Image: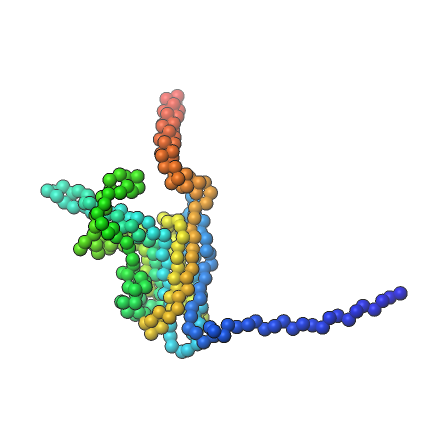
Amino acid sequence: MIQALPPPPPAVEAPAPERSAATEDRLRVAAALTEARVSVDSGFSGASIVLYGAVFNPGDDPTDVVVVVRGPDAPVRLVKKTRNLGVWLNSRPVVFEGAPGFYMTASTRPLGDIADFGDLRRLGVGVDHLRINAPEESRVVTRYGVRDVVISRLGEDYLDWRRAVIRLREAAALYNTDPEGVRFVDRGLFRAEIELPAVAPTGQYFAEVWLFQDGDPVSVSNLTLTVEKVGIERDIFEFAHNRPWTYGVLCVLLAAFTGWAASRIFRRQ
């Protein structure tokens, strides 16, 4: 006996996706990264990461986008060559305690055309307005395994030392400014590229995407990027920093053994 199948249930129409009424008429920017984590191994030769986003502009007034990427802060020790009695000597060492290991800005136009000096300085946008912490007092500390490193308070020569930090980082491709690095690919859609060199420091990077209109910052989107060592390089790095004395002794023993083994091999030949 064949039984009739029950009728199918009535079709349920899916509800339309809701839209946030609070942001429909608000000028804002949203951004994201193609990669939020970069792995560094022995074959690392740099990385290129795309930052993309959209500008929600309910009006017709034009806007500008500025991307700022700042790497982990680390101390920078500098010395200056000075000539005394015809002999070139190193000056007193100066340590900047909070210089970013990586810093780049990309924008739709030159920063000076987007906002005035005061706003850029207040936001810390641009190499000229980069915040680098200088020592506040004279003291003696231990840095990089070297004892009795004198850190002197900077006075009128602060700007000279600061320019030296920026110049050295720019030469190593760690600081970069691209006044046309942000490109709109469609109405409201933009992209920018973050170029990490092979010497980029590991750690957490912070990216700020600023939206300017009529010279004023109106919105910002914050992102994070992690650059970390992987594999045996990470194990050696952590071991060297967690147990520096043991690592140093092992390096000396390994160098002595390598020299002894090489002498034995060449002696036999």
User: Looking at the picture, how far across and down is residue 33, in whole percent?
Assistant: 45, 59
User: Looking at the picture, how far across and down is residue 9, in whole percent?
Assistant: 73, 70
Q: Quadrant of the N terminus?
A: bottom right
Observer-nearest of 222 and 269: 222
Q: Residue 90, located in which quarter of the rendered image?
A: top left
User: Looking at the picture, how far across and down is residue 42, in whole percent?
Assistant: 42, 43
- In the image, residue 228 sits, relative to residue 12, either above or below, namely above
**94 left or right, relative to 231:** left
x 36%, y 73%: residue:
213
Observer-nearest of 219 and 161: 219
Q: Residue furthest bottom?
A: 60
**42 left or right, relative to 130:** right
Q: Residue furthest top?
A: 268
- In the image, residue 184 sits, relative to residue 41, either above or below, namely below
Q: Quadrant of the C terminus?
A: top left
x 42%, y 70%: residue:
28
User: Can you see residue 87?
Assistant: yes
Colour mapping used in the image: rainbow
- In the image, residue 7 sits, relative to residue 265, either above or below, namely below
- In the image, residue 179 sits, relative to residue 99, either above or below, namely below
Observer-nearest of 123 and 116: 123
Q: Residue 248, located in which quarter of the rendered image?
A: top left
Observer-nearest of 266 and 102: 102
x 52%, y 72%: residue:
19
Q: How many marks?
A: 0
User: Looking at the picture, how far across and down is residue 6, in whole percent?
Assistant: 79, 69
x 20%, y 45%: residue:
92
User: Can you see residue 251?
Assistant: no
Q: Residue furthest left?
A: 85
